Amino acid sequence: MNISEKAKNIVDNCRFCWMCRHVCPTGNATGQERNTARARALAVSLVARGAEKLENVIENVYECMLCGACTNNCMTGWDPKVFIREIKTDAALSGMIPDYIEKLLDNYEKTGNVYGEVSANLPDGLQSGKKSDILFIAGQDARYKSPESLKGAIGILKAAGADVSMDESADDTGAALWFLTGKTGETVQAAKNCAKVMNGYKTAIVYDPVDLSLIRHEYKEWGIGVSARVYGFNEYLLEKIETGELKVKNKGKAYTVQDHYAYSRELDDVHTVRKIIAAIGVGKETMLHGKEADAAGSLIMNEYMPSVMKRTAENRWERLKNTGSRTVVTESPAEYELLKRTCPDGYEVLTTEQAIAENL
Ligand code: SF4
Ligand code: SF4
């Protein structure tokens, strides 16, 4: 197994203490011990020592959502995501990835997106190629799998007076390949292509927190320069609300935020969405919120383990239901789609922009 000393160190320094065991959303969805960070570290440790073969543990590696709940709870301060990503890279380079992941990579090669979609339904009045000063990076989840998110996002940007352009190649930030294969040459190339498009604009607004985290953290680490001013979508909307360019009313409705892990754990931002909610209604917290919030699922993983993603979203609803609010507000198109499909009777799920739109 070809992984860095840093990754080996993380595997070796897992104390197998079990303190992260209860927080793994896929472990909680499958009820299987092997799906926890601790068990993954143990399996990888066996591979590193030659006592197990990579092909026997690789499926377990792809059952990790890379949500970082284990990292947030690791008693020794280690980040299991590091070795998970490196093992994916090793498996990709040595031809040991599972067939269902190979299929997604084939889709990417043929269509430019892992979902194999040949076109996206862009909202009226906005077509690729129309150039303004602001680039809106919807990301591939919204572009191909969540037309409602895309429509709502463009609608609220219009309401805020923002004239935005979109570019299909910028919607591929490299995030899908980063998830499926870690840092390969193709992942870095996709990131460079995205940055090149971004740098043709003064401002880039990034819709999906997974893309935003990649641009803010890994682009810098990989030496990919971004000259455009980069906003997270919520940051941009909050600025527009605070300057009065996006006029909202507070109608007193109760909302519960479903924190997305990329915002809360990777970007350390749990406040922006709450300031937006405070401007339009009343925030009601669920027990595990902010950095402690459980992930509600991944659309990429939904392609190869839909029943586990369904169960993950259902598990999340169990807590979200007990807040005194009937409306959950999501920060990512993936969590919006998965929570919407599992929404219990009497509840609703809205994107942040849909919540704002009902208070204009
Ligand atoms: S990153 Fe998330 S899904 Fe992966 S092992 Fe940790 S808690 Fe589980
Ligand atoms: S909390 Fe950290 S050290 Fe303990 S089992 Fe989990 S990953 Fe290993």
Image (spheres, rainbow, N blue to C red):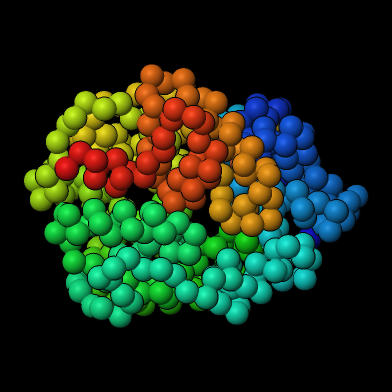
Answer yes or no: is residue 173 visible: no
Q: Relative to 153, does residue 30 appear above or below in the rendering?
A: above
**Furthest-left residue in view?**
244
How many numbered tags mark residues here?
A: 0
Residue 48, position as x, y percentages in the image: 81, 52
**Furthest-front residue in view?**
345
- Look at 48% across and 42% down and name the residue there: 340
Q: Is residue 149 left or right of residue 70?
A: left
Residue placed most toward the observer, 66 or 351: 351
Q: Quadrant of the C terminus?
A: top left
Residue placed most toward the observer, 43 or 326: 326
Residue 43, position as x, y percentages in the image: 80, 45
- Look at 23% across and 30% down and name the residue there: 281
Q: Quadrant of the N terminus?
A: bottom right
Q: Is residue 125 left or right of residue 222?
A: left
Q: Is residue 46 left or right of residue 335?
A: right
Dividing the picture into quadrants, the one containing residue 80 is top right
Residue 357, position as x, y percentages in the image: 24, 45
Q: Relative to 37, does residue 52 appear above or below in the rendering?
A: below
